[in-house]
Amino acid sequence: MPLLYLTRKEHFNAAHRLWNDKWSEEKNFEMFGKCANPHYHGHNFDLYVTVKGQPNPDTGCVMDLKVLKVIIRDQVTDQLDHQNLNLDVEWLKGQMPSIESMAVAMWPRISNALPEGVQLHKITLWETQNNFVEYFGE
Ligand code: NI
């Protein structure tokens, strides 16, 4: 049976601030630039979730994309959309809300919700038109 990779894209908007309390203001702005601005700022995030599996002979599909959509929204994007990532999201508390940390925090939430026989392969999170991160769960 062939192994295929299936991707669903979702979108959310959220605010954050990248700031390390252990550093001086100067060092924070040197590292994070405008992302360190004190009153937060927003991004339009694009999230691509790729699962892998073998197509079910009855449906020809790895999994029902409607089900994948609901998993991603319930577990991740509905909880992040229009929120402040530093303050409002329980499962990001105490973490720097970088796309790297966010991708890692999303992994078990999505992975644990997938149906039998389907594995999470990759989370790709775009923060701007130029910057994105890929996470394979390692
Ligand atoms: Ni930012």
Image: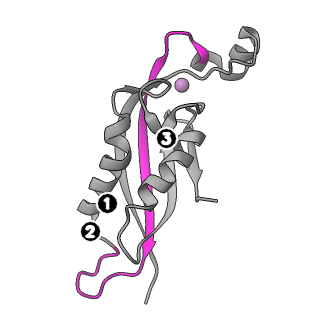
Q: Secondary structure at mark 1?
A: helix
Q: Is residue 88 above or below residue 54?
A: above
Residue at image mark 3? 126
Q: Residue at x 41, y 78 (%)?
A: 117
Residue at image mark 1? 68
Dot 1 crowding, Cα within 10 Å, few <14, some 14–19, many 20+: many
Dot 2 crowding, Cα within 10 Å, few <14, some 14–19, many 20+: few
Residue at image mark 2? 64
Q: Position of residue 72 (x, y in %)?
A: 35, 51
Q: Position of residue 70 (x, y in %)?
A: 27, 54
Amino acid tagged 2: Asp
Please provide the residue range marked out in magenta: 36-62
Q: Nearer the viewer, mark 2 or mark 3?
A: 2
Q: Position of residue 20 (x, y in %)?
A: 68, 21
Report how many numbered discs are placed on residues in the image. Answer: 3
Mark 1 → mark 3, Cα distance in angstroms: 19 Å
Q: Is residue 74 above or below residue 22?
A: below
Q: Is residue 64 above or below residue 41?
A: below
Amino acid tagged 3: Trp
